Image (cartoon, coloured by chain):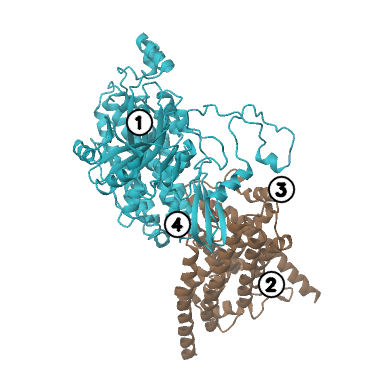
Amino acid sequence: MIIDVIIALGKIAVVLLVGLGLGAYLTWVERKVAGHIQARMGPSVVGPFGLFQPIADGVKLLTKESIIPRGADVPVYYLALILALVPSLLIFSVIPFGPSFTIFGKEIKPIISDVNIGLLIVFAMGSIAVYGTIFAGWASNSKYAFIGSLRKAAVIVSYEVVLGFAVLGVILIAGSLSTVEIVNSQIEKGIWYIVYQPVAFILYLFCMLAESGRVPFDIQEAEAELVTGYNVEYGGMRFGLFPLAEWYLNVVGLSAIAVVLFFGGWSGPNIFGPLSPYIWFLVKTFALVFFTLWLHWTLPRFQAKDITDIAWKILLPIALLNVVVTAFVVYLFS
Amino acid sequence: MPWISKEREERIKNRYKDVNVTRYEHAVSFEVNIDIFKDFLKYLRDEEGFKHFVDLTCIDFPEREERFQGVYILYNPDHNERVIVKTWANNGRLPTVTDLWPGAKWGEREAYDMFGVEFEGHENLRRMFLWEGYPHFPLRKDFPLEGYKEEELPSLTEVLAGREDPPSHDFELVHTKIATLEDIERTERARLKKKAQLVLNWGPLHPGTHGTIWFLFDLEGEEVVQCDVILGQLHRGMEKIAEHLHYFQFLPYTDRMDYISAICNELSYVQAVEKLLEIEVPEKARYIRTMFAELQRINSHLLWLGTGALDLGALTVFLYAFREREKIMDIIEGNAGYRLTTAFLRIGGVHYDLAEGTLDVVKAFVKDFYGRLKEYHSLLTRNRIWLRRTKDKGIITKEDVHAYGLSGPVARGSGVPYDIRKLEPYAAYDEVDFDIPVGEVGDVYDRYLVRMEEMVQSLRIIEQCVEKLEKLPKSAPYINKKHPAVMAPKQDVFNDLEDMVKNFRIVVHGEEAPPGEVFSSAENPRGELGFFIHSKGDSRPYRLRIRSGALYNLSIFPKLIQGGSIADAIALLGSLDPVVGETDR
């Protein structure tokens, strides 16, 4: 029993450290990628290849003066931070990084909690995260922040619905909500579900961009219109937390879920030895993350009403159709 | 610009008997009595086709009883004729012309701000650049150049911190009164009566406003119900400064108006002065001017493209545009010595001969730039999101182009081929071959396409200029130093006694201009930049009015944005492309 707790704590520690470390280093990756896309160098001064840049940024953010605006609702102001960061971290609790293995006669699954409603947790966390944005906008007592948070709320409400219906197809085929089971069923069938569900994957990509507030759906930030929108009144590390949670942890978390749902999770030819599944998982995840970054630095931004228009009028009907067709096919062939 | 024809003049004189016509070579003005003034303007607009509003200003003559003279510049787009109408104010009052040309709204505000002339019937006559409660009218002749000395005034931060002791600055040196927080609040309230849910202050310091423009949006949700713009954050009183400088001394100030396209500003100013002083410009100088003006136009359009795309979220285009812009900056720096505020042109020519190798660099740039333009097109032109953000947004009709006095790519985007380079060719524009792209719908997307195509046309012009300049001998003169009002180049001054004496005389006494009037304008990247000079025969202009294209283009913004959202505002503002240095002067 004690051992179980220790193992669980160990897994949490590893995921948390890796997650936050990744978040920090993704800023470096993003800046490098953006730099090369934009015909410039990206960070290159601090350390070799600018590798210490995230540390310098962290130190800067931590030591900066942080001002709470006059008239702010202070408890809610802080609650927003927690509500932004915690859900995006909790997504990682249901991500399976590899197959279970045995060490000293003890079976260990490289997932924090293999619950049979794993995907529901992901959606729930996505929905809770929007409170972080809304609270941040409300508590800041600023018009810009308020408008930004309202935009975000409108986007999340519409895309949560689409997201739910988009992955329903995969769930129908796999017959489970557990992330581990979904991967296992793909390995058993020897096929990735993107082959069965290409439409769902595209819908998922849209939703992923919308949920994580990446271009072309970054209307809640929209530097040129709303300065940075909902987090404009936050300073120092409090400000840093929002992009960390939204732009990096959320993107990585949702990309990992996409890999689980559509790209067979950790499956892949065993060419790296015992670490092969983990490497495959990370490679697939980061390929998706890179794709997101690539879009971010290429496309212009949609308008708020266009985004919700697309969600309700185009994506949702497609998703519904996809679910119905999948259900039929699954019913006929099983 | 061809001015009003004799024939039309006769017709008008037959109809209105007591109209005085003054004909200078570059300005023809009708002086009418204030009683028939509105009637006369209406006649000119409806019957004679002078429907395009160019500019409105005042001149102060303290020795006259009426004191203020209103000056209205109109344009007939069908016959390509221009005319100036003047009238004397009645007890410091003039009738408003906003019912005839809505674009006069801001011009009248400015005249009120600067002269205290009241325009009867104006819907909301407020100060344009200065704040509500500022007691003086700066362009009046009795306003001293150094300003009125003020009581010591603490800075805003000091007021906020509650400091009562004498502030740290030496306020003996601060002559001009600074607006207090109450003044600013009063200004804001005077502009906009709140009708909807919330008033959003957009600016003065906001990344989307391209400078220090202060927008007030009255929002219902995200929909803009009404809007007004508060300008003046960058107001430096250029017109007042010009009245106290010799003609050549004012040249560097023009750089600081539309600082993105300094050489075009200089070209416009230098031309006006050359027309006043009757200076011929050598061929080489004309071609150098044309080439650099077009390089500057590409430079300016690249900045517009970059920031416009940045505003709509396409972050990468910004840096691609700046990569090319840097090359133009290098070419300009290599010739003028400065990158931004170049002061490259001189009255009568250009400051330096072409630097060695310039033409090769320009050729290489032109060759490369065609491909770069394709790159921009592939990023944006067919992009669905870009289309969605720009198509059918902020449509300007042809009527509005004339009524608001719009010019430059904004006018051409609506299908009005109003391009001074063709209508009144200056520099070498009549000797080179180029087309004027026009839009069809007049939306943000059309203005985008027009500007993109203008860059191609600029490249064509540059190619022709390079060709011509390569043929011209190295020894060809680049400045007309024979004219008594033109300063000789520096190397001549150090080697030649006569040139030195002449320069000395000009620097000390200035150029002697004949009395008269000139209105001359040039096609800037941001529209028609005109200079109206009223000379009384001194080395300084009695009144120098700067007709800013960016200001008039911006003046239609509050109308266009009604019913749009904040996201539209940013796309729209990007397509109007104002530069605050020019709108505020």
Chain under label 2?
A
Q: Which residue is mark 4?
A: B561
Count neighbours of disc 3 (C-alpha within 10 A) and say few if under 14, some if 14 to 19, many if 20 or more: few
Please tell me which residue is depicted at 41% across the width and 26% down the height of the picture. B542
Sequence-wise, the earlier of marks 1 and 4 is 1
Do tag 2 and tag 4 residues touch (Cβ < 8 Å)? no
Crowd tier of the residue under label 2, counting other residues whose Cα lies within 10 Å: few below 14, some 14–19, many 20 or above? many
Pick whichever, B319 or B501, lies toward us. Answer: B501
| Residue B132 in view, yes or no | yes
| Quarter of the rendering containing residue A260 | bottom right
Q: Find residue B507 and report its image quarter.
A: top left
As drawn, the label of residue A63 is: 3
- For chain B, the rendered hue is cyan
Q: Which chain can be seen in brown?
A: A
Which residue is label 1 attached to? B358
Question: Whole-percent x and y of residue B366?
Answer: 33, 40
Q: Quadrant of residue B24?
A: top left
Q: Amino acid at mark 2?
A: Ile
Answer with left or right where residue B373 lies relative to residue B314: left
Rounded to the nearest whole Å, what is the CA distance between mark 2 and mark 4?
A: 52 Å
Viewer-side label of 2, 3: 3
Residue B154 appears at what percent x and percent y?
A: 67, 36
Do the numbered discs 2 and 3 sit on residues whose CB atoms are within 8 Å?
A: no
